[in-house]
Every structure is written in structure tokens, then in C-alpha cells.
Image (tube, rainbow, N blue to C red):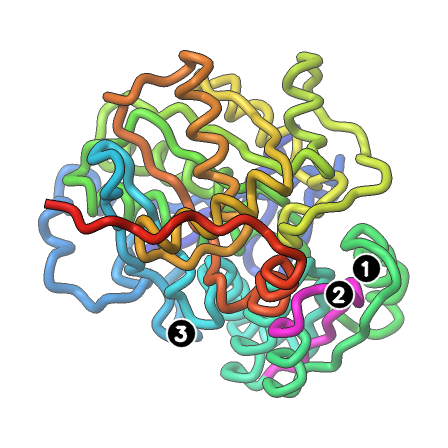
């Protein structure tokens, strides 16, 4: 595994020691990146040497912290080629432990909390990060304090309770949950593990970048569609691509990074369209996709910079379109996607229609969670008469 050299602020470039647990840059509150000494691996570790390793994200040990991992088998999720368009791939993160991509980030973050001797962790969550933290904290023997909006999908509430976390349901949004954590963490002795307010969730999420590259034969796609709430995964993959270039595994090519949000909570597309470097808080946020109901991402400045650097874009899609896409992915592809993942398909269709992308472009759509995590939400849509696609005809 890689030795951590230091932590680096994404705003001012300040270097911070990794010898003790850190949250954000003490100078300006910028998110911190983990920087490693890759010198022992440059020109020596070849991508093909990864084949045959264990099937979790920790198989990429040379680019992850040199500690004993707290793992439940996260990572190595399927890359499903679309039956509708052979140039479209669905990265199904719903097959991770606890049913979502959050398992990757929380595995890495809880691993480091255990390494540092942290006893209590607190998190504000829109749902899936909470259940992932509850699971990994249970595996690590660390006390988890979770704050979620009271209207999150039922599965998230049940999971947190079953895993033994201390759960508080809040009448509000994830931003209201974050305020509670921020106000109480000092007195309660909690380590705040909020998105981009500690450096290691990015490290877990970046393995999606390594993984999709390996699954596509170390040739990056033309575009990646990423359902964006806090944006940790998008940021992590961009970091991964830079690391892979340093290791000599890829060249300077990069995919267009596409941030997909819901029309009822779309701070990133609004900022993108206005050519702003940061987003403004989205008032009265609402969407059927609970994970996209993030009024303002802490590291929005990084997200927007990545979109610009990659030649990508940000797009908002409606809840009606999202619900239709849930049914379509299930009936046409056999993938029961979370609403957030279904939003990727809608975004892809819109950018094909606009000419931003061509049908011949090779793209990856991220399904960030299992539809089973939203079974009460989807059942409610069925009861309300949501349109379902006609049964598939047999294909030859």
C-alpha cells in the first residue's frame, strides 16, 4: 500500500500533516486531498498485474492508505453493457454492501478513523451514507451518530437502527442535519465525517475511476454521467485519473464529466449555466431522488472546475423523467436503479438529443444505488399511477 506523504488543500495548496485525523484546511476551510509517495510504483507496477487480486476496492492497495482496511467486500461492481445501445455502459453501484456507492467512501473513511483511534463519528446524510456509515462503524467498533431528514426512504432508517447507530431524524434537509452536527460535534466529541469535510471518503470513491478504467481495458470512456449530490464520487474519479496518469497507466485523455441533478434541487446546473465558480444555496429543495436533495455541496467549487476542465456539463432532469427511467432501466436492462441512477439515463438522452454527445460516443452511466433501497418510494409511485413501460418484446 502507499505511504501518505501529506494532505493538500484544494483551495490554497496548504500542506497538512496526516499524522492525526484532519477535517478541512485550517487556513480557508478547503477540502483536503490525500497525497502519496507513488515513486516506488512508477514504471514498475503494471495495470495487468491487478488481475487475479481479490474482488474488493482494496485490490488497488498501491493507491490507498497503508493501513488495515475495515471492509465488507465493497467495490468490483458490474459494468453492464446496455442492450439498447452497445456504446452505453451502466456501472451498477447498487451491488455494493448496504446497496449503494456510499460503501466505498465510508469503508475508507471509517478505516482511517479506526487507525487514528477515533471513538465517535457523526454524519449528516440524505440516506445512503447513513446506512453505510452505520454498517462500517459497527464493523469497526466505533460509535456512529447519524442525522437524517425524517422523510428519507424507509430502508435507510431501518438499516441505521439494525446496525446499532444512534439515529436522529430531523424535520428538514441534509443542510439542517449538517448544522446540528457542526453545532454539537465539539461538545459531544464527534469526528465529523461529512462529505468533503474529511479527506478519505474521496479515497474510497476514487476507486470507481480505477475500476471502470480496468473494466474498459484501461481506455477511458468519452463521457461519464454522475448523479451529483455532494459530488464526492465525481471528484474522486477525477483524482483517480490524475493518479493513473502519474503511474503511467493512462495518458492525458479524460472523459467529459457530466453532473446530473434533479430539477427540484439543481444548484450545480444553475451555477454552471451562469458561469459561476461556486453554487448558491437552493431554496425549497425537493425531489423523489433523496440523494440529490443537497441544496449546496461543500466542495461545489471542485465539481464546477472539473466540469470545465473535462469539457463536460451539468444538467437537471425532472422527477417525472426520473421515475419513468427507473421503470425503463428495470424492464429494458434488468437493472433496478435508484432514482439517482435513473437520472443518469435521462441526462444521457437529453445530451444526445441536444447534439452535445453522439450515439457513437462510449459513455458510462452511474447507477449509484439499488432500487430496493427505495422500495417504498417506488411503490408509492406505482400507487399514484406512475407510467410503466410496456413489457419487452423478445430480441434476436
Tell me the crowding category of disc 3: few under 14, some 14 to 19, or many 20 or more residues within 10 angstroms, Cα based.
many
Q: Which mark is residue 148?
A: 2
Residue 271 position, x and y percent, is: 70, 22
Viewer-side residue, 232 vs 250: 232
Give SS at disc 2. strand
- Report the magenta residues as a range: 142-156
User: At 81% across and 34% down in the image, what residue appears?
Assistant: 281
Viewer-side residue, 126 vs 206: 126
Q: Is residue 55 magenta?
A: no
Please indicate, yes or no, whether residue 261 appears anywhere in the rendered image. yes
Q: Quadrant of the C terminus?
A: top left
Give SS at disc 1. helix
Give SS at disc 3. loop
Instruction: Give me the C-alpha separation between circle 2 and circle 3.
Output: 24 Å
Question: Which residue in the structure is indicated by mark 1?
Answer: 177
Image-quadrant location for residue 78:
bottom left
Q: Is residue 337 above or below residue 143?
A: above
The reply to whether the C-beta atoms of the residues labelled 1 and 3 are less than 8 Å apart is no
Tell me the crowding category of disc 2: few under 14, some 14 to 19, or many 20 or more residues within 10 angstroms, Cα based.
many
Q: Is residue 146 magenta?
A: yes
First in residue order: circle 1 vs circle 3: 3
Q: Which mark is residue 71?
A: 3
Instruction: Give me the C-alpha separation between circle 2 and circle 1.
Output: 6 Å
First in residue order: circle 2 vs circle 3: 3
Left or right: 101 as drawn, with respect to 260: left
User: At 55% across and 54% down in the image, what residue appears?
Assistant: 18
Indicate which label's residue lies in the foreground, 1 or 3: 1
First in residue order: circle 2 vs circle 1: 2
Residue 327 position, x and y percent, is: 46, 52
Instruction: Give me the C-alpha separation between circle 1 and circle 3.
Output: 27 Å
Amino acid at each position: 500500500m502507499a505511504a501518505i506523504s501529506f494532505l493538500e488543500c484544494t483551495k490554497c495548496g496548504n500542506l497538512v500533516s496526516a499524522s492525526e485525523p484532519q477535517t478541512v484546511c485550517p487556513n480557508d476551510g478547503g477540502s483536503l486531498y490525500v497525497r502519496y509517495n507513488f515513486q516506488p510504483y512508477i514504471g514498475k507496477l503494471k495495470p495487468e498485474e491487478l488481475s487475479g487480486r481479490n474482488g474488493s476496492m482494496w485490490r488497488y492497495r498501491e493507491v490507498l492508505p497503508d493501513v488495515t482496511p475495515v471492509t465488507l467486500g465493497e467495490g468490483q461492481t458490474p459494468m453492464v453493457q446496455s442492450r439498447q445501445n452497445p456504446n452505453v455502459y451502466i456501472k451498477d453501484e447498487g451491488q455494493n454492501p448496504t446497496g449503494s456507492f456510499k460503501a466505498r467512501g465510508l469503508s475508507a473513511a471509517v478505516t482511517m478513523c479506526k487507525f487514528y483511534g477515533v471513538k465517535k463519528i457523526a454524519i449528516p446524510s440524505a440516506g445512503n451514507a447513513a446506512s453505510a456509515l452505520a454498517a462500517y462503524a459497527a464493523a469497526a467498533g466505533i460509535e456512529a451518530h447519524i442525522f437524517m431528514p425524517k422523510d428519507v426512504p424507509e430502508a435507510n432508517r431501518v438499516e441505521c437502527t439494525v446496525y446499532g447507530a444512534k439515529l436522529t431524524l430531523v424535520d428538514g434537509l441534509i443542510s439542517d442535519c449538517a448544522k446540528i452536527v457542526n453545532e454539537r460535534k465539539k461538545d459531544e466529541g464527534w469526528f465529523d465525517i461529512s462529505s468533503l469535510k474529511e479527506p478519505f471518503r474521496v479515497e474510497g470513491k476514487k476507486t470507481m475511476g480505477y475500476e471502470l478504467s480496468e473494466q474498459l481495458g484501461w481506455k477511458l470512456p468519452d463521457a461519464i454521467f454522475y448523479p451529483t449530490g455532494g459530488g464526492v464520487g465525481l471528484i474522486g474519479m477525477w483524482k483517480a485519473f490524475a493518479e493513473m496518469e502519474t503511474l503511467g497507466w493512462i495518458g492525458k485523455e479524460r472523459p467529459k464529466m457530466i453532473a446530473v441533478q434533479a430539477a427540484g434541487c439543481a444548484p450545480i446546473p444553475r451555477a454552471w449555466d451562469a458561469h459561476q465558480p461556486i453554487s448558491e444555496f437552493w431554496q425549497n429543495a425537493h425531489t423523489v431522488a433523496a440523494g440529490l436533495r443537497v441544496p449546496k455541496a461543500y466542495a461545489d467549487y471542485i465539481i464546477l472546475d472539473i466540469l470545465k476542465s473535462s469539457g463536460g456539463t451539468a444538467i437537471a432532469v425532472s422527477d417525472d423523467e426520473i421515475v419513468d427511467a427507473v421503470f425503463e432501466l428495470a424492464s429494458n436492462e434488468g437493472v433496478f436503479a435508484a432514482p439517482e441512477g435513473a437520472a443518469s439515463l435521462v441526462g444521457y438522452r437529453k445530451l444526445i438529443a441536444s447534439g452535445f454527445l453522439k450515439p457513437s460516443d462510449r459513455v458510462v452511466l452511474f447507477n449509484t444505488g439499488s432500487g430496493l433501497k427505495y422500495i417504498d418510494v417506488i411503490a408509492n409511485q406505482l400507487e399514484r399511477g406512475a407510467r410503466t413501460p410496456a413489457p419487452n418484446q423478445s430480441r434476436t
